[in-house]
Amino acid sequence: MASPSQQVTSVASGDVMRLSVKTPQQSRKKNTYQRKPSAQVILAHEMVAGIMRQAESVFSSDKRFADRYVGMARRIAMKYRLRLPSGIRRKYCKHCHSFLRPGANCRVRIGVKHISYYCLECKKFMRFVHKSKSVKKNIP
């Protein structure tokens, strides 16, 4: 097998050809996405937090506006590839993307190992891991 930089001379024409064999590491697709500047990422985090506060304040008067605000916050987070904090992720349904307020349009159940959110808009469950404080028993 030829090495990646081996030169081969053609017998018939006398031309020099260069063979290029790619190794598996070279043939992988390069990540073409560039990171956003850190100032833009910080600003995007603040915008998402502000939009979610607006969604919470407007929810009691018009639920559709709150859902629109959730959509805006999600689009900003996807554009800047942000990982949203768990507090913000629990405020909207991951299936129908509607703003959730416990007691109004979602049910919250606390289990031993997880917290379950039941969206009353789309009738789907979401589970979040809950670290319970376990009591260690001293066994003599």
Image (spheres, grey):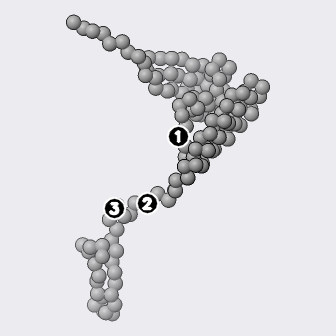
Which residue bears the numbered disc 1? 83
Residue, far top: 140
Which residue bears the numbered disc 3? 24
> Which SS class for mark 2?
loop
Tell me the distance, in whole angstroms, between the alpha carbons under discs 3 and 2.
Answer: 10 Å
What crowding class fits label 1: few (fewer than 14 Cα within 10 Å), some (14-19), or many (20 or more)?
few
Which residue bears the numbered disc 2? 29
Q: Quadrant of residue 134?
A: top left
Does residue 14 appear anywhere in the picture? Answer: yes
Q: Nearer the viewer, mark 2 or mark 1?
A: 1
> Which SS class for mark 1?
loop
Whole-percent x, y for residue 55 in the image: 70, 31
Q: Quadrant of residue 98?
A: top right
Name the residue: 27% across, 9% down. Answer: 138
- What amino acid does circle 2 point to? Lys
Residue, far bottom: 13
What crowding class fits label 2: few (fewer than 14 Cα within 10 Å), some (14-19), or many (20 or more)?
few
Name the residue: 61% across, 29% down. Answer: 91
Which callout, 1 or 3, points at the residue further toward the start of the chain?
A: 3
Which quarter of the figure is the C terminus placed in?
top left
Lateral position of residue 123 relative to residue 27, left or right? right
Q: Which mark is residue 119?
A: none
Which quarter of the figure is the N terminus placed in?
bottom left
| Number of numbered labels in the structure image | 3
